[in-house]
Structures are given as structure tokens and as C-alpha cells.
Amino acid sequence: MEKPANKWIVAERLLLVVALILHFSNLQGLSIYALDEAKNATAAIEMMHHHEWVIPTFNGEYRFDKPPLHYYFFILAYKIFGINEFAARFFPALFGFLTTYMVYRFVRKQAGVKAGLFTLLALSSSLHWYIQFHMAVPDPFLIFFMCAGMLSFYRWTLSGFRNTPLMLITYTSLALAVLSKGPVGVLIPFIALLSYGLISQMLNGKRLLRIFNPLGLAVFFAIALPWYVLVAIKTDGVWLQEFFFKHNLGRFSAPMEGHGGGFWLTWGYVIAGMLPFAVFLPQSVWYSIKFRAQRVTTFALVVAATIVLFFMFAGTKLPNYTVPAYPFLAILVGCYLGRLKKHQLRKAMFWPSLIYVILLIILPFTIYYGLKSDPSLTIKPALFIAFASPWMVLPLIYYSYKQRQLGRLAASMGGGFIVVTLVFFWYGFPMLDQQNPVLAAKLAEVKSGEVFYYKIFNPGFSFYLQRPIEDLMKVPDPPRADGFLITRKRFLSELDHLGLHYEIIHEGKDLFEPPITVVLKLMPASLDSDPDL
């Protein structure tokens, strides 16, 4: 391993502290509001209260979306910190930081200190990376275990597949990835690692026998399989049928919940998610393909390309699907920047730096006026000023480029987006979050009575009310239901047709979504007013 100079040690420690702070920034200050996050966080509460360790439920009904590993971590956090936003997000944030640290240590050992630090900088500057690890969803656990499995596989290849501990780490990690999000946790790594083995011409009969080691396979199935067997037995196979056919094959074959789009959308998510160092991705990929100077960059390119191409052909497209590729894209960028630093190739930094400067300048305008275009939101001018604060790095970028200080130039670029991330979590998003209909609703009043829903409701209400929300249509006589009703405004005419009497106590548009949530105070018809009695 390359011995680092004192300044690189200082940079390493500083970046790791920054990454730790950003992963945990304002976890408790943002509501559990997003649909998937609210359902996952609430399902864990229900499992904890019912002492249920096999069948996930949401609002008392089977939740077929994902396996249970993340629920177990959420339950552990609830027991330590209580039921709150910080607890729900604690382990996702922790696994985000652990992934970042793991990738840095891997690159430092395989490609040197400079490449490791640039990789750490690239990953630690991505706002979308931190957003993903600020959510109580299964993806953080999938990303960590999938990444751990593939990095340990690479190290295993260096021993000719003779290192038993690395073999066991690989199989254990991939088994936990399967418990995090299902078969995708092993399918994508299998395709990526097989592709790397073929491209690197390292596979033969003897090595394949070592790879598919009976002990490793036994460990994999011993960890991954028992829960699937138990849930199949307890639900008569219904859970597995829904999970595999609807939430896996269904999502891959066709868009679900309106999340479709062309193949180009996947690339757009990757480029936006890897900002600011996405500006170096074209050169980094070309450098890896053209020179193949390092095995580790070939490995990273194959893995990243497999993940992106896999989801490019998927029918359902979401920004979080390609996040497992970010560590490997960061490796490509980090190794490329390490080469530029070593050879002082300033010209190669010109166009990426220029694109970065343009993006940083237009960023506050795009955010401020984009949000102002939504009449349902109250946007203060201070938001523009806050997101313009990263402009402070622009003189540093110019000075570093002129002085050929490429390390400082990259650090300035990363620093600008680190400021963007701090502004986002501590000022920008909290301002918007307070306007979501769950927090804005009169929850204290709603908690005082029975709560119903009609057709659909925001699952954030379940997390904050922490009680079952009953389907109004399952009530024997809906017009005489007493309590509160949560639904959407477009259904009010249907409620009138059903003969319900109510008072609207809250109305608010969902953040970044067209539906308008309404909370109604039900005024049940009295028995005396019923003409049929």
C-alpha cells in the first residue's frame, strides 16, 4: 500500500468527518413523508408492536414489496432511540457512511492514496447519494451489501479464488443483499462478476469450481433462504407470488405507478446523481477503456455498466435504482483524477471545470424559479441566497486552475456541492417539508378520534398517528362513521353521493405531486334523521 504524506492524511480525515456529518445531517428535522419511506418506517413499527418477525404489514395488511432485513434494523433503532424520524433513518445513514469508507479503503489499497482520496471526494460530494441514505427504505442496505460482496469478490480474484475468508465474505454479503431487496441483490452481481471474469480472461474450470465452492453456497442459502421459506409457509405462498411476479418481474417488464420513461432517463438519473464529478465521467470511462492501465478501473467500469444497463432496460425507472453504481463510477473518476494529478494534465481539467462553473452559477436560479412556478408552495427569496452561497468556491476554482493546483481544483469543486448539500438538508428542504399536508394537518385533533380513509391516503399519516387507519368502505354504515377521514379532494363528490356529512379541517397539495390531500371531520347522521326508521 502506498504510504500517504501528512497532507493526504489530513485530507483523508477531514473528508471522512465531512462525509459522516453529511450522512447524518438533520435526520430528525425532516418528516417521514415520502410514500415508500413512510410505508417502510410504519411497517417496522407494526412488526415491532405485534412481535412479528416474518410477515411485513402496513396498516394491518400484507406488505409484499420487500424482504425484511431493513425492518429488523429499523426495529432495533426504535428500541434504542424511540419511534421518531432519527431512529427510522439512523441505520440507512450509518450504512451510507460505511459504504463510503469501505470504497475509499478499497481504492486506497488497490490504486493508491491519491486515487482513494479522489474517489472519496467524488462520492462524498454527491447530493443524491446523501438523499438516498436519508430515507428509511431498503436501498441503503442493498447498496452496502451488494458493494461489499463485489469488492470482496475482486479481492478474492487476486488470490486465484483460494482465499476462504474472502469467499465467505462474498457469499455472506450477497445473501444479505438478497434479504435486503430480493433476487436483484444477487442477479446483478452475478452478471457483473461473470462479465468481469470473461473480459479479464480469468475463468477456467478449476477457478469456476473454486468460485462455486460448496461451503460458500451453503453459507449463502443458509442466510438467504430460511425467511423466504417461512413467509411462504405462513402466507400459503401468497407473499412470494406477489413479491416475485408483481414487484420484481412486473416492475422490470413494465412501468409501475407511472414510473416509466425512455432508456435515456436512466442515464439522466446517473449524470444528475453523480454531480458534480459527473463532469469527469466521459473522460474517466474513455481512459479506462482505452488504456486499461488498472485492473480495478476495468472492474469498476464493468460493474457500473452492468447496473446502469440492467435498469436502462427495466420498464420501471426510478432515480434510486442506479445508486448502487455510484461507488464504482466514483472509482473510475477517482483513478482518472489521480492520473491527472500525477502528470499535472491541466488541459484535461478545462472543459469539466467550465461545465461545473456554469452548473453552479445556474443552480440557484433553477431551484428558486422552478419551485416558485408551483403556486401551492411558499418560497422565500432567502432560498435563492442560500443556494447561491456555493458561488464562494468560484474564485478558488479559477485560482487553482491558473496555478496548476489540480488537487485543490478538485477539492474546490467538491466543496461547492458539499455546501449545496448542507443548504439542502438544513434550510432548503426543511422549508418545503413544513408545507407537506401531513405536517400541516391538525394531527393533535385527528388523534382524538377514530381515523378512516377513503380509497387512498398519504402513508405519512400512519407513521405519525401510529394507529390503524380503517377503510371507510368496510364500515357497516359509512354515513354514521364518527371521527376523521383522510382522502383526496377529487373524491369529495363520491363522498357526497354516499351521503356523508363532513367538515374540511385541512386541505393541502402533496409536495411535487398533483393530488390534493384533505382531512375531514365526519359528522355522522343521527338515527332520528333517518327517514327509513
Image: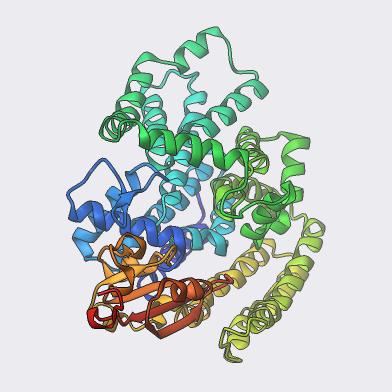
Q: Residue at x 40, y 22 (%)?
A: 163
> Can I make out residue 248 in this image?
yes
Residue projecting furthest to the front: 532
Residue placed furthest toward the top: 205
Q: Is residue 43 above or below residue 443?
A: above
Residue 365 versus residue 125: which sits nearer the camera?
365
Where residue 315 appears, as percent x and y from the top left, is 64, 43
Q: Nearer the viewer, residue 236 or 130?
A: 236
Q: Is residue 344 left or right of residue 233?
A: right
**Residue at 73% from the left image edge and 67% from the top image edge:** 356
Location of residue 334 in the rendering, given as x and y in whole percent from the top left corner: 62, 50
Q: Is residue 255 above or below residue 352?
A: above
- Viewer-closest of 371 and 19: 371
Residue 432 falls left or right of residue 37: right
- Vertical comparison of 226 with 44: above or below: above
What color scheme is it? rainbow
- The residue shown at (70%, 53%) is 265
Q: Is residue 461 left or right of residue 188?
A: left
Q: Position of residue 463 (x, y in %)?
A: 32, 66
Whether residue 329 is situated above or below residue 92 in the rendered picture = above
Q: Which quarter of the image is occupied by the C terminus? A: bottom left
Residue 232, picture quadrant: top left
Residue furthest out toward the bottom: 381
Residue 11 visible in the snapshot = no
